[in-house]
């Protein structure tokens, strides 16, 4: 961990993403959807940007906050849990904030939770008093315990946290839970949520002041376009004028119905819907008098 050095001037933007793990594939897919492409092979650590001067660094997720802090990378896609843990750890030793979440990305949902042996009966946080808790998130756990006035031992482990109770190195754990399978496989049960987390795009606290700033702004704008249209669907259909009230009543509240030119016997219509439409909804709309229904995903939009 180091103080924030002045970022060296560069004309290519560098983004760190997880090389292997839960966030790796969705992170790449998102950046690809932003129009980025690279000359690379999947197992390389560095991918050279082809469509834009934006390069990728494939690393361990735990290294991403530090790479941004050191100015080695300009952006990173990382779990908010990891970013917050390292931000808290920096503050605890008096270092200034070096990175911040810029956007939530809508994938990588998980929770940092307390897991206790299955045979324990959870009666509340008071029972943590004097216990040993194994975790890879010591800063978050320490702050959480302090807020509740609990004196417990935080046992920092970098991996295999879930077996600590069986090995006798801790009484319980605080770890990420996604499906819950890891806890169950280790005869532990989740009892308390310390933090909800999703993947975020993280960037430096200090603004870039060279050509990378424009690249970053462009990327953020494209990401916002993807976020805004993630759930949007365009419904196209034909219907007679007198069927329209019944059909409109079946559309999502957000739908904005527009009449298109043409169509002799029936109107040609389109409706932008803020949410997806299920098969069942489409069939009901059809029964209400619509025909030729078609649902189109919105791929790109610039606000
Ligand atoms: C987390 C956590 C558990 C697993 C839980 O690891 O440490 O091992 O996920 O998932 P489950 O509830 O679906 O079983 P993560 O994928 O974040 O990898 P890392 O901690 O090694 O970076
Ligand atoms: Zn990790």
Image: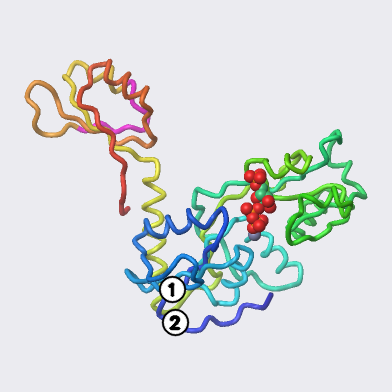
Determine if the C-beta at disc 2 is less than 8 A from ligand 2. Answer: no
Crowd tier of the residue under label 2, counting other residues whose Cα lies within 10 Å: few below 14, some 14–19, many 20 or above: few
Q: Circle 2 — which element? A: loop
Q: Nearer the viewer, residue 55 or 140?
A: 55
The answer to whether residue 174 of the structure is visible from this angle is: yes
Q: Nearer the viewer, residue 285 or 63?
A: 63
Give how far apart the Cα atoms at labels 1 and 2 are: 8 Å
Residue of label 1: 13
Q: Residue furthest left?
A: 264
Q: How is the image coloured?
A: rainbow
Location of residue 32 in the rendering, given as x and y in whole percent from the top left corner = 38, 59
Q: Are marks 1 and 2 in contact (CB under 8 Å)?
A: yes
- Residue pictured at 31% horizontal, 51% vertical: 300
The answer to whether residue 111 of the structure is visible from this angle is: no
Image quarter for residue 41? bottom left
- Where 125 sits versus 203, above or below? above
- Where 246 sits versus 183, above or below? above
- Residue pictured at 76% horizontal, 71% vertical: 93
Residue 186 lies in magenta, yes or no?
no
Q: Which residues are magenta?
A: 249-258
Determine if the C-beta at disc 1 is less than 8 A from ligand 2. Answer: no
Q: Quadrant of the N terminus?
A: bottom right
Q: Is residue 206 left or right of residue 158?
A: left
Q: Circle 1 — which element? A: strand
- Where 194 sits versus 292, above or below? below
Location of residue 141 in the rendering, given as x and y in whole percent from the top left corner = 77, 54
Residue of label 2: 10
Q: Is residue 113 left or right of residue 49?
A: right
| Residue 35 disc label | none
Residue 251 lies in magenta, yes or no?
yes
Q: Is residue 243 left or right of residue 196?
A: left
Location of residue 231 in the rendering, given as x and y in whole percent from the top left corner = 39, 41
């Amino acid at each position: 961990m180091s103080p924030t050095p002045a970022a060296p001037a560069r004309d290519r933007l560098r983004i760190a993403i997880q090389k292997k793990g839960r966030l790796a594939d969705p992170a790449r897919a998102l950046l690809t959807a932003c129009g980025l492409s690279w000359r690379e092979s999947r197992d390389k650590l560095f991918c050279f940007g082809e469509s834009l001067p934006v390069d990728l660094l494939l690393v361990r997720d735990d290294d991403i906050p530090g790479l941004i802090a050191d100015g080695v990378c300009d952006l990173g896609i990382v779990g908010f849990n990891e970013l917050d843990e390292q931000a808290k750890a920096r503050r605890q030793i008096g270092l200034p904030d070096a990175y911040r979440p810029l956007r939530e990305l809508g994938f990588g949902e998980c929770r940092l939770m307390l897991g206790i042996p299955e045979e324990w009966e959870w009666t509340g946080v008071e029972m943590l008093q004097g216990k040993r808790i194994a975790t890879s998130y010591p800063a978050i756990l320490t702050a959480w315990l302090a807020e509740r006035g609990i004196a417990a031992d935080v046992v920092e482990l970098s991996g295999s946290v879930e077996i600590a109770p069986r090995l006798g190195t801790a009484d319980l754990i605080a770890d990420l839970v996604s499906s819950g399978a890891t806890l169950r496989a280790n005869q532990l049960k989740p009892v308390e949520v310390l933090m909800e987390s999703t993947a975020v795009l993280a960037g430096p606290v200090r603004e870039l002041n060279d050509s990378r700033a424009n690249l970053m702004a462009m990327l953020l704008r494209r990401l916002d376009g993807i976020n805004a249209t993630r759930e949007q669907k365009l419904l196209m259909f034909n219907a007679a004028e007198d069927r329209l009230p019944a059909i409109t009543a079946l559309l999502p509240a957000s739908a904005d119905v527009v009449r298109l030119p043409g169509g002799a016997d029936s109107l040609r219509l389109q409706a932008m819907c803020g949410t997806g439409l299920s098969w069942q909804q489409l069939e009901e709309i059809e029964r209400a008098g619509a025909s030729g229904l078609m649902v189109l995903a919105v791929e790109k939009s610039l606000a």
